[in-house]
Image (cartoon, rainbow, N blue to C red):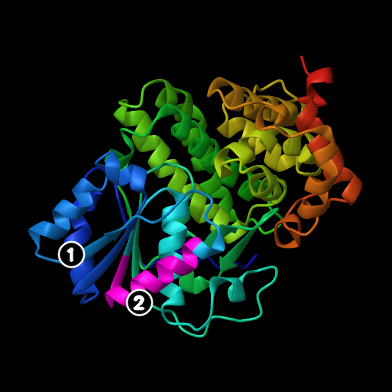
Amino acid sequence: MSFSFVSPLRIEAGEAAVKQLPNLVKSFGAERVFVFADPGVVKAGITTPVTDELDQEGITYYVYQDLQPEPPIHIGDHAVAALKDFQADLVIGVGGGSALDIASAAAVMHGNEGSIEDYLNLSGTKSFQHKGLPKILIPTTAGTGAEITDIAVFSLENTKDVLTHEYLLADAAVVDPALTYTVPASITAATGVDALTHAVEALVSVNATPLTDTLAMKAIQLISSSIRQAVRDGSNKEARSNMAWGSMIAGLSFYNAGVSGVHALAYPLGGMFKVPHGEANAVLLPYIFDFIWPYATPKMNMMAQALNVYEEDMSEEEAAKAAVLELKSIVEDVQIPADLTHFGVKRDDLKALTEAATKQSRLLARSPKSYSYEEIFDRYVAAFEGKLEVSKTHS
């Protein structure tokens, strides 16, 4: 088979990778740097290693913090305006997925006319004509993969939509696990399951390739073997390093293969009930795979091996079901709610969620099993009731 594979131009990864930042800035000939950073990350001092490197080289910069999780469009438009006012020639994003998404979107919008709304995937009418400013993305959580993907997510009234274009790809990504050491357990859990979701959805995607499979399998192995420890003991450097590396390669895999049903149903959950993206993915993850596993059995067997639940005497069906149960076990072990009721969802809300999810055709098209309206509704019902079909037959 033939396939293509796309990634950022440069990746700096590993302990103390942030020390490469001055050289990266200089490689772009930048003199005025606009830094987008989560306010919580700034308050916690996590941006200090970044700004220290800029200070030591005498690089002029401004740290912009008017950001929020799951950002609405107006937050993005304000960021674009502030970037233009500063007359920057380089953008750095520091933080979780939302901060990196805003940094990418603002850098590209700097070179294009109109509002972010004009370029949204589902409803936009414009296409990007220019790349905008160069950008360096530095994640402070191990989860979103935003540092190496071309997607920027924005919240709408009842769902989410995205900017997606190769111009949004980072010119350089800096993945330093040391920046994740102080991330709270709850965020470690949510972003970690988000990364795991990226890997398992990429593995079963209809657009998967041998290369994305290799990356997804390694990401699943690293994340599933480390997430419980990283949540229990955030100071465990090996677990943190495995999570940071696993998240990044999961991002490389899903950027090229795509994600599908979990994300498609999670977007409305985040839009309507403001459930953080990682938790929205986590609560839906086992219920989606409970539905699709019969249509991706070979990949589910690979997944079972990467999750370390495969046994030699298992049938293909048993291995697939074991993988689904392990996904649910991980979600429960890191203490993310196991059903939709914990997020304030009522049974009467499921039809509205279903209506919104059916519009996520870009995502649903990558699933190994297509979804009807009734099947999407059924998955929301399963997640609402917290019931897995595989639990009834698996021993």
Left/right placement of residue 345 relative to residue 251 reads right
Give the residue type that dot 2 points to.
Answer: Lys
Residue that mark 1 sits on: 23
Q: Residue at x 57, y 67 (%)?
A: 163
In percent of the image, x 35 and y 68: which residue is there? 135
**Left of 272 or right of it: where is 78?**
left
Viewer-proximal residue, 353 or 13?
353
> Looking at the picture, how far across and down is residue 280, in whole percent?
63, 40
Name of the residue lying farthest toward the top: 395
Predominant SS of the magenta segment:
helix
Residue 89, magenta (yes or no): yes
Residue 21 at what x, y percent from top left?
21, 59
Q: Nearer the viewer, residue 267 or 193?
A: 267
Label 1 sits on a secondary structure element that is helix
Label for residue 84? Answer: 2
Magenta-tinted stretch: 75-91
Q: Amino acid at mark 1?
A: Asn
104 up-or-down from 198: above or below: below
Q: Which of labels 1 and 2 is toward the front? A: 2
Q: Secondary structure at mark 2?
A: helix
Check if residue 218 falls in the magenta segment.
Answer: no
Q: Please state, as top left, top right, bottom left or bottom right, where the C terminus lies in the image.
A: top right
- The picture places residue 387, in percent across and down from the top left corner, at 79, 24
Q: Residues within 10 Å of mark 1 (few under 14, many from 20)?
A: few
Of all residues, the one furthest to the right in this rendering is 374
Identify the image quadrant of residue 366. Answer: bottom right
Whether 190 is drawn above or below 60: the answer is above
